[in-house]
Amino acid sequence: MKPVSLISTSVIILIVAASASFAHIINPETGLKFRYNAELVEVSPVIDGVLNDTPWHETGIPGKMDQEVVYDQQWLESSDFTGVFAGVWRSGFLYIAIQMSDDQVENHGAKLSEKDHLVVYLDPDHSGHKSDLYRYDLPVGDDEHQSFDPPLRAVAWGDDGQSCELMFNLGDIAEKGNTIGFWIYYNDVDNGNLEHRISWGPPGYTDDDLSLPDLVFTAKLKPNVNQKVLQWGRIKSFYY
Ligand SMILES: [Ca+2]
Ligand SMILES: [Ca+2]
Ligand SMILES: [Ca+2]
């Protein structure tokens, strides 16, 4: 082999190695990267566990928790469990809201494995991989534990443990176009046993997959001429 082709072979190997170490998750149904777009909002939600904030209703894009990651099955909405989350950002903070419906809320067990709990991975460095360094275990309805490893700053539960709001302080990372690693799932404990692990994830994604999905900070909503006209029209309608 000539020296030149040796060099080019090395370059190709390096490129392949680099792309492998920065794995993305591809949705097999679309062929596109599996990711969540967190949208910029004009007003931050209040972290009180109540999901009546304007950003959740007008801006947050629903991310369905519909992949069972132990058995690799699509999870259909049922009384056993149904869950959806949304994420928005503003001024260096990422806000996540989760709305759940679990037929048996269990949060009195001695061990974490005996309690319904959410698990959230949030990797500000976007390594692309799962790691306990940025994993948060959040037992349902646990409002007493109020000290969290950064960047998680606040957790609030509401609706008897069926709704939750999270706030992450990400500083400069929460900027339009930036990407972080993010994943969320629910450990459903019923009758004292872990019955299911239901996640936001594409078909085929399982617990054994070491790659983390992406969360991208997007900013489409900017006041434009049409929105101003619309608001002006609304104000006028009060008087005419
Ligand atoms: Ca709220
Ligand atoms: Ca259940
Ligand atoms: Ca349960």
Image (spheres, rainbow, N blue to C red):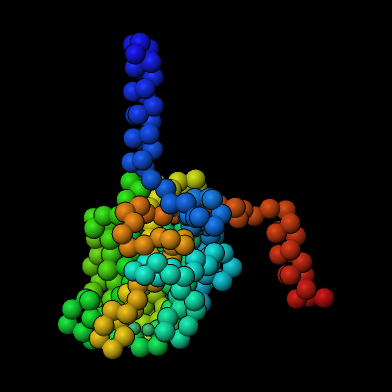
Left or right relative to 146: residue 176: right
Snapshot quadrant of residue 201: bottom left
Q: Which residue is pictured at 35% across the width and 52% down the height?
A: 211
Front-lying residue, 177 or 144: 177
Front-lying residue, 70 or 2: 2
Rendered-image quadrant of the N terminus: top left
Front-lying residue, 145 or 100: 100
Residue 108 picture location, percent across and down: 23, 86
Residue 123 picture location, percent across and down: 33, 53
Relative height, residue 239 to residue 108 (above, below): above
Left or right relative to 123: residue 28: right
- Observer able to see residue 199: no
Q: Which residue is pictured at 78% across the width and 73% down the height?
A: 237
Snapshot quadrant of residue 42: bottom right
Relative height, residue 18 to residue 125 (above, below): above
Residue 230 picture location, percent across and down: 74, 63
Residue 221 picture location, percent across and down: 60, 55
Q: Which residue is pictured at 56% across the width and 71% down the height?
A: 57
Rendered-image quadrant of the C terminus: bottom right
